[in-house]
Image (cartoon, rainbow, N blue to C red):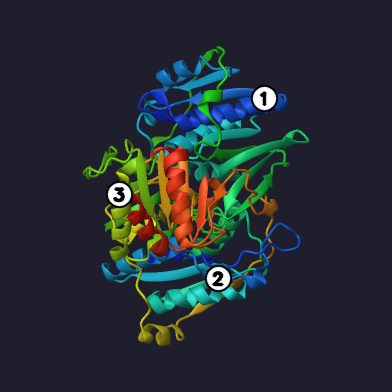
Amino acid sequence: MNILVVLEDNNGAIHRMSLEAIVAAQEISLKLKSNITVLAMGKNADALALEASKYELNEILKINSSSLNGYSSDGYAIAIEQIILENDFRYVFFGHTYQVRDYVPKISAKLMRPFLADNIKMSTSDGSIEFTKQTFNAKLLADIQTSDSGVYLVSFQSASFSSDDLRSGSSEIKKIDIEIDETQIKNTYEEPFQESAGGVDLTSADIIVSVGRGIGEADNISIAKDLALALGGQLSSSRPVVDAGWLSPDHQVGSSGQSVSPKLYLALGISGAIQHVVGMKGSKNIVAINKDPEAPIFEIANYGIVGDIFEIVPKLIESLK
Amino acid sequence: MKIAVLVKQVPGSESPLSIADNNIWLDEEKVAYIMNESDNYALEEALLLKEGTQDCEVVVVSLGPERVKKIIREGLAKGADRGIHLNINSNDLTDPLSIAKIFADALKSENFDLILSGLQSDDLGHGQTGIIIGELLNMSTGSLAVSTKLDGNQIAIKQELEAGFFQNVRMTLPASITIQSGLNTPRYPSLKGIMGAKKKEIKTLDIDSLDQSLKISKLYLPSSSNEITMIDGSSDQIVESLVKVFKSEIKI
């Protein structure tokens, strides 16, 4: 069985989530007889291929095409579709990045083959892989089997596998040519940019007090601010708080915002939706207070309190003084 | 200019989620349904574009059983001009590819200039349907738009990337774009809008069963593989325990 892993470029280095996808492929190859091919493309294809050559893989395919020097969803989809059609891959693995969300559904449409997105686990049976993803805002899990013959496009959620588990080896780089009809590239992309840095750097904070929808309204945020102060920490939030305009975007923790790994992450009224959790699951200690005992945050927290933040937080602040 | 907004009916965040006996879907009897949140933002974006454009029609489209007419009417009440109900008597639509094909086949002859949909649904959250539809209809596609601006036969979007980055993208029409939550403030329907919605057309197209290649083999509650320590008691007891945990376990 042949597995293709598509490498995403992170400024000349293989994106961490692509490394995690390689780990997933290497795990499968321990259980099911399989060959692993990786694909390096884009303006830094040479660097990505070189980096990949130190891992235990069967083959590295490298595309140097000027049409792919800048990212475009059409360009990437056309190139990968061609690679898939010219080879016999059973699975194509990706990290579930925003870029992958942008172009892989187009490959799914071109091939009329399913894209199983954002998986957190996999298991093998009968020579095929069963994938697990979170559904209903992480409240339920769904297992999805892959027993058709025909290729499956698969992406993995951040940190579902660890690049610490990469097995090293060495493999050959094979340069391949593909045809891209530039008239098929319909969008024009400018360079990515960051909005004005707000001065809230959460990535170096040791202690973070974070608020979610459960804080209720803008005025209530003061209790979280006071708690952060009492603990000597920083204030952050999940996306809905920023969308509502209660805190500025630089407070946002999650896939679209900052990724944090403090010693203590205190989650107040945060349900634990996927896009938030991927930004804080690296925290050493997670304490969650939520009035809903079924909130998914309790799946990843170390300490949990089912209770009213408006009763507990003020008393906590008093106790800490 | 013709804009389609694709809206999905999903369980609300407070809805019970009890699993059906077959263990592959929910017991729908108990579900409290709402319009998917990011689709609501897509609808608002379409209505804003309509307000800024001469001669513009917004059509709300939803796939599902009879109950989805409710969210189509909601869209009409907010200002959409007409609705299309793709009527399918199925409760477990799980495969974005076959779902997208239904939309693409049904909407092809309408020749929409723009198709807007939420970035993902709050039930299965595959996050692909709008992009697949665009690709099937040979439209340009874009995802995670946090702003849109029409410019002749092009549309400029600001696309959200990870870690606080953004990217400006110019797309040619026709385009299918998935919309990120929070980019606008969705309006509430006025009483006039609600009354007026009753006179607006909802076309119903019956869809046969579909052939899904992505199926759920099991739907279940996560078991706590993580060893969480629950702290309970009165608020005073909780606070006392928590301070102890801070000092002796977490050491802060």
Q: In the drawing, what numbered circle is on residue A29?
A: 1
Q: Secondary structure at mark 1?
A: helix
Q: Which residue is mark 2?
A: B33
Which amino acid, mark 1? Answer: Ser
Q: Place residue A75 in its image quadrant.
A: top left
Q: Which residue is mark 3?
A: A230
Query: Mark 1 belongs to which subunit?
Result: A
For marks 2 and 3, give the CA distance: 41 Å
User: Can marks 1 and 3 be said to lie on one chain?
Assistant: yes
Q: Secondary structure at mark 2?
A: strand
- Decide: marks 1, 2 in contact (CB < 8 A)? no
Mark nearer the viewer, 1 or 3: 3
Q: Place residue B67 in its image quadrant.
A: bottom right
Query: Mark 3 belongs to which subunit?
Result: A
Number of residues whose C-alpha sits closer than 10 Å to that of mark 2, classed few (under 14), some (14–19) or many (20 or more): some
Work out which quarter of the rendered image holds the C terminus of chain B and state it: top left
Residue A59 position, x and y percent, is 57, 18
Residue A165 position, x and y percent, is 56, 24
Which amino acid, mark 2? Answer: Tyr
Does A278 sit above or below residue A84?
below
